[in-house]
Image (spheres, rainbow, N blue to C red):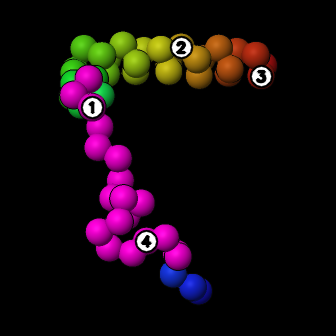
Amino acid sequence: MNPPVNKEPYQQAYYPPMPTAFTRMMRTNVLWQAIRFVVINLKMLKLMRKSH
């Protein structure tokens, strides 16, 4: 398998984008994670209810 062409070291395309301060805060905020957990579970329950 051939290596990617644009992955030469020290080029802009080599490094992943850095998350913003807001993104880092949302990833580490326990309250936000709890809200997302509830929302995702409600979506799954809705999907399961439709299948029966």
In which quadrant will I find the C terminus? top right
| Position of residue 34 measured from the top left corner of the image (x, y, whole percent) | 31, 17
Query: What whole-number distance in Å separates the C-alpha atoms at marks 1 and 3?
Result: 39 Å
Q: Position of residue 14 (x, y in %)?
A: 37, 64
Most foreground residue, 49 or 36: 36
For marks 1 and 3 on the same chain, the one whose residue lies earlier in the sequence: 1
Q: Say left or right for 36 vs 22.
A: right
**Kind of residue sitting beneath label 4:** Lys
Q: Mark 2 — residue? A: 42
Q: Are marks 4 and 3 in contact (CB under 8 Å)?
A: no
Q: Is residue 3 above or below residue 11?
A: below
The residue positioned 39% from the left and 75% from the top of the image is 8
Q: Any mark on residue 7, and which?
A: 4
Image depth: mark 2 or mark 1 in front: 1
The residue wearing badge 3 is 51
Per the image, is 13 magenta?
yes
Span shown in magenta: 4-22
Q: Mark 2: which amino acid?
A: Leu
| Marks 4 and 3, the one that precedes in the sequence | 4
Discs 1, 4 touching: Cβ within 8 Å: no
Q: Quadrant of residue 46?
A: top right
